[in-house]
Amino acid sequence: MKTLALIAHDGMKAEMVAFVKDHIDILRKFKLVATGTTGSHIQRTGLDVELKLSGPKGGDAQIASLAAEAQLAGIIFFRDALGKHPHEPDVQMLLRICDVHNVPLATNPATAKYLLIGMAELIEQGK
């Protein structure tokens, strides 16, 4: 089973939960891992989610480590592009790791939808 990471800044958590509810049938095909607070919100949808630390406490770095070790099929990270975040260096490191290791990364709902559709198709093809 492929692993998908889910992250959302505080201002985007409600949008992440709505996205999860809208795509729950596809998301059930993945092992899910998430930063702590985001994951606890997602768990309320009934999905099983492995929780890491919250983003500001190192969760973004934990997920970046999984990406660097080729343990993730993709990451959905709903970023609050207009907000200030004390852990911005960790966010930038996560984005860089995805680029260095060619890990698919969606940072908004429109891209996340296409990422999920593509990944689900690969799963159906047995890839």
Image: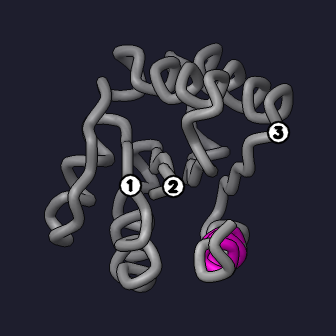
Q: In terms of sequence position, does the residue under pointer 3 or pointer 2 come before the other?
A: 2
Residue 110 lies, with reference to residue 98, above or below; the image says below
The residue that label 1 is drawn on is: 31
Q: x, y percentage for residue 108?
A: 65, 62
Segment colored magenta: 115-122
Q: Residues at badges 2 and 1 in contact (C-beta under 8 Å)? A: yes
The residue where tag 2 is placed is 2
Write down the quadrant of residue 125 in the picture. Answer: bottom right
Q: Nearer the viewer, residue 84 or 119?
A: 119
- Mark 2 nearby-residue class (10 Å; few <14, some 14–19, many ≥20): some
Helix, strand, or loop for circle 2? loop
| Residue 113 seen | no
Q: Dot 3 corresponds to which residue?
A: 102
Q: Amino acid at mark 3?
A: Asn
Element type at mark 1: strand
Question: Which residue is depicted at the point 19% across and 58% down?
Answer: 43
Cα distance in 3D space between marks 1 and 3: 19 Å
Per the model, the C-alpha gap separating discs 2 and 1 is: 6 Å
Position in image of residue 45 (x %, y %) = 20, 71
Residue type at mark 1?
Answer: Lys
